[in-house]
Amino acid sequence: MSDETPLVKMRGVKLEGRSDETWNLIINGVDLTLARGEVLGLIGESGAGKSTLGLAAMGYTRDGVRISEGTVEFDGIDLLTASAATKRELLGKRIAYVAQSAAASFNPAHKLMDQHVEGPVQHGVMGRGESEADGIELYRKLRLPNPEEIGFRYPHQVSGGQLQRAMTAMAMSCRPDLIIFDEPTTALDVTTQIEVLASIRDIVEQFNTAAIYITHDLAVVAQMADRIKVLLKGDEVETADTRTMLAAPTQDYTKSLWAVRSFERPRKPDVITGSTPVVSVQNVDAAYGKVPVLYDVSFDMHAGRTVAVVGESGSGKSTTARCITGLLPPTAGQIMLDGEVLPPDYRKRSKDQLRQVQMIYQMADTALNPRMSIGQIIARPVQFYLGLTGGAKRKRVDALLEQIELEPTEYYNRLPSELSGGQKQRIGIARALAAEPKFIICDEVTSALDQLVAEGILRLLAKLQDDLSLTYMFITHDLATVKAISDEVVVMKDGRVVEQGPKDDMFKPPHHAYTDLLLSSVPEMDPDWLTNLLAERGVDNIGDAAVDKM
């Protein structure tokens, strides 16, 4: 339950973004009120202004953005006129932020724990030793493996899902009055997501913390928010309590967001018996240093088909991809391309072997060079793999931009920072296509995108597969995506394949116990779903027991 007195009050807030020398309106007079202990869900498609409004609630704007009108108050303090010293005292201590891209938010040169304790120590909340002990406890609450040890790793030494949880723990370190959660579970698998959502809910309730929860996942916001505000291109569409919004949205746009993703690939003919796979993973073991991470992994991927590889964070999905690309040579087993054994180390592969296997990355923000134009980014593999230069290179880049449905004259000279999340992901697709490969690894390529944009990316990938006879390995934790695009499914857990087969068979019972756990962990558009699921699994509360018993 929330208190009556508002902690956050925003009135008539307008924000503008700068393009060249012109300021353009991006948030158009939005009001927002938030009480202690209350969670407000902000939803809308990419470009709606969700993150911009969430940051404005902190009195903060990104470079090139300004608050041009309105008021922003936090606990009676006017954040727009407050001194820099006042803001420094508030931010990190009483107001915290959990960013969507943990990989882009952590300093790669410092260990996780060093970054975790910085806030509490600098703000005088607790000393170094106490802060470290509290950090370990928060890591345990958020279901991080080896909580006593993981904080002493560098960011690159943990998975994306683990890094996202470490950032959530860091935001909670000072027990702030307000936390802005900006898509905090997009990098998490469904089982880990449940544990993190339960822990976030518990923290909010225990400490009477107010939260703004920004997400494109409507089923997730249904579990987290007391109220929901819908945005479209900087305008407020409607606001209502969660149950009312779910049961009876009043606006057509909100109803369109509520609609279940409609796209699903038609069933393809069965694989011809005895046909040679494009890529075959055969009895692969792998290790990071002396630590084994893959055990006897085997599966095939045939021409023109999509194999979805699913499993929890740390199950070995991306590690298998690293073995296929030659970035992590297996300690046993082999990778085959068109029936021929690939050298385990990419440095020993021919240029043509490298060309045939390409990758589209999860976080376009960190995968695209921010200092290069879109044209330069796509042109590099065109020149390297195809040897094209001059006018021929430009013509090929333009053709690739057209293939991903972006106008060459409009996008060629833009920087990545000038693109939306969905547009950046399309550039990642074009860069992979530039090599003219047979096989593409799609690593969580829609996890950071809203439902409408994600569907557009899936439709594009399906069209490209049909037009170019591409073979996809689709790494994902989103089972709706698996249903939409896959032909076969491989389920991994703890570095092993526990189940595999055609998509239609995998979604019919009986399932392997772990597959059943994944399927039952997909959030539903029911505000009571998470509470009921925890009760079904024998959890009496949503705090420590939630993460200990799952």
Image (spheres, rainbow, N blue to C red):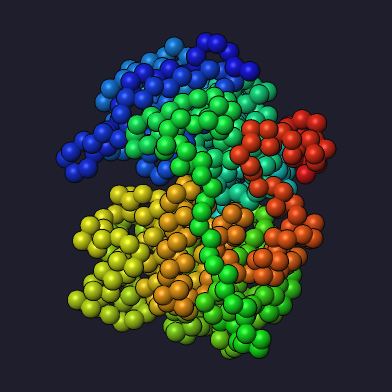
Nearest the viewer among 142 and 453 is 453
Q: Quadrant of the C terminus?
A: top right
Horizontal relation, residue 418 to residue 547: left or right: left
- Direction from residue 549 to residue 207 in the image, left or right: left
Q: Can the viewer see residue 103?
A: no
Image coords of residue 365 (percent x, y): 42, 52
User: In the rendered image, which quarter contains the N terminus?
Assistant: top right
Can residue 22 be seen here? Answer: yes
The residue located at (47%, 42%) in the rendering is 257
Residue 229 image point, x, y percent: 46, 29
Please name the residue shown 62% across and 80% down the image.
Answer: 271
Q: State the image coordinates of residue 161 (x, y, percent, origin top left).
A: 60, 50
Considering only vertical position in the picture, is 243 above or below 362?
above
* 548 versus 212 height, above or below: below
In the current view of this chain or complex, which residue is farthest to the right?
538
**Of residues 392 and 514, which is closer to you in this image?**
514
Q: How many marks?
A: 0
Q: Splitting the image into 4 quarters, where does residue 57 fall?
A: top left
Which sits in the foreground, 34 or 221? 221
Q: Is residue 278 left or right of residue 492?
A: left
What residue is drawn where x is 39% and y is 22%? 31
From this viewpoint, which residue is outermost toward the left? 21
* Residue at 74% over, 39% down: 533
Q: Is residue 444 left or right of residue 369?
A: right
Q: In the displayed structure, would residue 139 be above or below residue 109?
A: above
Report x, y in % for residue 514.
Answer: 76, 56
